[in-house]
């Protein structure tokens, strides 16, 4: 591995500074595929709820690289024999590139078109790209190794678990970064402390038992961030509208509708023939332009939904403990009678999360558990020792949210089934 003549330093609000010593890392950062991440927001539609959440996947990717670099240098300083030193550059490259395949408003596009960002990350690493060019300079098989770590198929579990596990560099960076940029108070935890108590042990990354409380704090902050930020109903509402926009556009395309405005990468996406070169052109700047142009389309639904997204005229929501399918059917029929297509103006959302997944052999083998190492070199899965972790383990279910356009509320006497009136108008 070649070191730069002079170390490069990025100023970063979360880690203060990010240090680059390897030529390969510096070259990867300067590829066009990596620079594209500056034009993709880390949190998709979240900026419509928390206006500070404008940070990009570029800053998060650098952050994951920096956390990984810090973990490895701690291992090296302590001269842990269980750390495979030769894997350092591979870990750093995989950390830097783990999200390189994210597209604009990833989740909405993935849901409508069945694409997957992890798959695109691997395609960018392996395909005809500047990233691939840089990686090949390390060795001809190096791109395959990086893709293997991103796809979690690489033979060394310890390398994979640094980048993706239940206590990994990815989560450690995004929790702190998202908390910082949204401005919320929960979500923070003592990163320095966690970095100090990690160590390699017999092919795993484990936590020294003395660090249990720091890890509890990290898991709690993840729990809080999911409920307060990631599942925020207003963010979800914006996401639902985006989903509907893509679904409508896809439907129109399939019906042979003539769009007044269309861009090549989207057309290829509709045709299911998106090439790598086209995918790289898809970013949020382009999507913003598309949405602005679509407000002028002849199709009323597409124009209205696009306007709603841009002007933040989002769907309102009501919270329900359960979904009565009969009543929902009634609501749909009523909407149809008023000329409103429920496929694009009604949605029931049910967020759920797993703060920590207790290891169950044979069931969730891919979810690496957090292991505590005590003074006598005995490993114990964290939920066996921590009451707090036990209490937030397993699936946490939210409530049902019913999303609908606000104008409906004004006319709800004939639109909303009588049994639901209380829900829409609690007075
Ligand atoms: Zn990430």
Image (cartoon, rainbow, N blue to C red):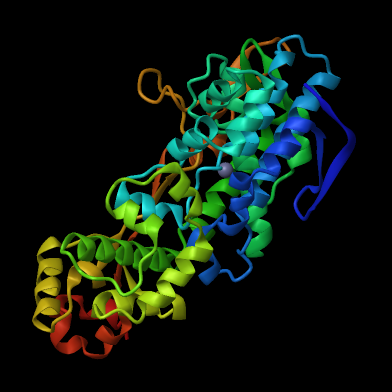
In screen coordinates, is 157 left or right of 115?
right
Give the residue drawn at x 58%, y 41%. Answer: 219
Instruction: Answer above or below: position of 3 versus 316.
Output: above
Q: Quadrant of residue 332?
A: bottom left
Q: Can residue 208 be seen in this snapshot?
A: no
- Residue at image coords 20%, 67%: 343
Whole-percent x, y for residue 402 in the image:
29, 68
Q: Residue furthest right?
A: 6
Observer-nearest of 97 and 336: 97
Q: Position of residue 236 (x, y in %)?
A: 41, 63
Question: Up-down: is 319 above or below 377?
Answer: below
Q: Measuring 31% from the left and 78% from the top, which residue is drawn there?
A: 303
Q: Quadrant of the C terminus?
A: bottom left
Q: Is residue 253 visible?
A: yes
Please give left or right for residue 237 compared with residue 150 in the image: left
Q: Quadrant of the N terminus?
A: top right
* Quarter-of-image position of residue 259: bottom left
Which of the 4 image quadrants contains residue 97?
Answer: top right
Residue 77 position within the rendered picture, expressed as x and y whole percent measured from the top left = 85, 21
């Amino acid at each position: 591995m070649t070191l730069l003549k002079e170390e490069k330093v990025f100023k970063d609000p979360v880690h203060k500074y990010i240090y680059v010593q390897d030529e390969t890392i510096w070259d990867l950062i300067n590829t066009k595929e990596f620079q594209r991440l500056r034009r993709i927001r880390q949190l998709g539609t979240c900026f419509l709820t928390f206006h500070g959440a404008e940070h990009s996947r570029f800053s998060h990717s650098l952050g994951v690289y920096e956390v990984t670099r810090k973990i490895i240098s701690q291992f090296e300083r302590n001269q842990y024999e269980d750390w495979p030193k030769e894997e350092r550059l591979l870990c750093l490259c995989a950390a830097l590139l783990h999200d390189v395949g994210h597209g604009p408003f990833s989740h909405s596009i993935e849901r409508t078109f069945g694409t997957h960002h992890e798959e695109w990350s691997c395609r960018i690493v392996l395909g005809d790209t500047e990233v691939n060019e840089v990686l090949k300079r390390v060795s001809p098989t190096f791109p395959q190794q990086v893709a293997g770590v991103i796809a979690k198929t690489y033979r060394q579990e310890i390398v994979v678990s640094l980048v993706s596990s239940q206590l990994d560099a990815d989560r450690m960076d995004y929790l702190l970064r998202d908390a910082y940029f949204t401005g919320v108070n929960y979500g923070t935890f003592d990163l320095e402390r966690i970095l100090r108590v990690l160590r390699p042990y017999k092919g795993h990354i484990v936590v020294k038992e003395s660090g249990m409380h720091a890890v509890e704090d990290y898991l709690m902050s993840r729990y809080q961030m999911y409920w307060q930020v990631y599942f925020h109903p207003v963010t979800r509402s914006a996401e639902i509208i985006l989903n509907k926009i893509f679904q409508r556009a896809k439907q129109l395309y399939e019906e042979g509708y003539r769009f007044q405005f269309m861009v090549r990468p989207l057309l290829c996406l509709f045709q299911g023939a998106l090439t790598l070169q086209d995918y790289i052109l898809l970013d949020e700047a382009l999507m913003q332009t598309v949405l602005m142009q679509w407000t002028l389309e002849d199709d009323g639904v597409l124009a209205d939904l696009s306007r709603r997204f841009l002007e933040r005229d989002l769907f309102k929501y009501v919270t329900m403990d359960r979904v009565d399918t009969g009543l929902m059917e009634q609501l749909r029929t009523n909407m149809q009678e008023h000329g409103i297509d429920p496929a694009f103006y009604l949605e029931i959302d049910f967020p759920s999360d797993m703060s920590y997944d207790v290891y169950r052999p044979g069931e969730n083998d891919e979810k690496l558990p957090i292991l505590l190492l005590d003074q006598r070199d005995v490993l114990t899965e964290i939920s066996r020792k921590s009451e707090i972790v036990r209490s937030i383990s397993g699936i946490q279910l939210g409530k049902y949210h019913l999303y609908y356009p606000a104008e409906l509320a004004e006319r709800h006497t004939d639109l909303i089934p009588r049994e639901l009136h209380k829900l829409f108008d609690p007075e």
